[in-house]
Image: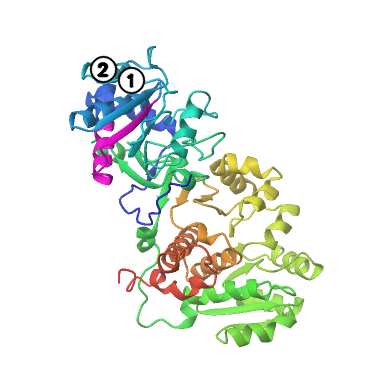
Amino acid sequence: MVKQSINFDRSNLPQSVFNVKTVKQLECKAIDTLGITMYELMLRAGQACYELARAQWPEARHWLIACGHGNNGGDGYVIARLAQAAGINITLLSCNSSSNLVNQEANMARNAWLSAGGMIYDPDIIWPENIDLIIDALLGTGINRAPIAPYNHIINMINAHCAPVLAVDIPSGLMANNGITPGVAVIANHTLSILALKPGQLIGKARDYVGVLHYHDLGLAILLTNIKAPIIRYSEQDLVRWIKPRRSSMHKGDNGRLLLIGGDLGTAGAIRMTAEAALRSGAGLVYVLTHENNVTPILTARPELMVDILNEKLLKKALAWADVIGIGPGLGQRKWGQKALKIVSGNKNKKPMIWDADALNWLARNHDNRQNRIITPHIGEAARLLNVSISEIENDLIYSAKTLAQRYGGVIVLKGAGTVIVSETGNVVIIDVGNAGMATAGMGDILSGIIASFLSQKLKLIEAAYAGCVVHGATADAVCHQRGMRGMLATDLLKLMWQFVNPETRDH
């Protein structure tokens, strides 16, 4: 049963993202430096979850709370005690109803629940009919394999129920470091991330399970400000970092000369979308080299472009003219496109480039390492570039992006639901915009055009990748607000992109 809630406003979430090991270290640091006990942290986490539940579902009068054997379960016992004290009817299921829990703090929370008159039920009971809220406090962030009995049984029961679900820290069964689901996982309406955001809440399958993501620092913000996060989350609010207002005296030459190469027979649309996206995001001059049959249709559709036939003479001349080079959309795998790639690949200058689509298929067979290039693979292309299976890429997107950066150099944009960007220095960024409406033909061509345009406007490679991906996803979210996800076309983004590439209009 799909229970998800769609939320495009994530402005209240922090930028810093930490893996599970680092979060554990943060907890230990709080204990050592601030004199806070682990049980106090558990009480704070339970309080935060209880308050969020009351705020989101104020009319809910009968909560079912599913508790596991660790600290996540301890949080659940705290939530139960607070809710019962407020007059809410609680049905609490425990996977360890008669034995000690893993941690002392979780045992303390359970004993406090029992001392307050709370009841604990076995996981195989028949659920009451009037449950109107479910709290998932089963497994938390510590698991690294598929849930087993009785956890998988409870997760299936939660997903089959019609009541909304709040997940404590992360939906049970979703891996906190990579966002994969090796077995069943709770489909939550809302998730409260505790102390820090984790990668698995943002990438991989996260959006299928997390619902609306919330965050609480448990009063430990002072600790987080002094620690450099290994992963950064960027969203629409960050566009001001890279896209500045234009000088009044600017002319088209100030905004770059961009050469785009692609569009074999039957794929004129790909290079045309890339080129128009480049214009719509601010490139000064865009010159397209394509198959001769595509020249007239592209010029007719978008007369602001310069379009010519792709041949060796014109390509070499254009490479000398351009400030930035983009190659791949619609290029195909025939000798015609292969020759163009060989010429571009052999080019000795250090001009910034973006390679996408068919250029990546060529690169997978002809490895090279360049510092002046952005590549934008989706998961299938990444698998070919690394000569591994798609599942290996999906199982660790961050590691895969880092490996791509080491092998091919420059900047890697590993596209997906939670795009991962990595430079050869190893800095990791997750782009936290976009929606499932983007799962349609041409979206990658639009992205290539936006990134290439920002390169032509003098952004550094890594900045153009960040800004391009955020503009791309934020525009798709704006389209979704207007018209929904299903039936979204890549060209729909061209009509709304101005909202995000113009600082003077972005807030209006």
Identify the magenta region: 45-67
SS class of the residue under badge 2? helix
User: Label 2: which residue?
Assistant: 114
Residue 218: in sight, yes or no?
no
Q: Residues within 10 Å of mark 1 (few under 14, many from 20)?
A: many
* Residue sitting at the far left: 86
Label 1, secondary structure: give it: loop
Instruction: Confirm whether the magenta stretch covers residue 62.
Output: yes
Question: Which residue carries the number 1 mark?
Answer: 120
Where is residue 220? Give x, y as percent. 26, 35
One can see residue 13 in this view: yes
Q: Quadrant of residue 304?
A: bottom right
Residue at 35% x, 53% y is 10
Q: CA distance from mark 2 to mark 1?
A: 8 Å
Query: Which amino acid, mark 2?
Result: Leu
Q: Residue at x 46, y 49 (%)?
A: 429
First along the sequence among labels 2 and 1:
2
- Please identify the quarter of the rendering in which residue 480 is found: bottom left
Query: As rendered, which of 349 and 441 lies closer to the eye?
Result: 441
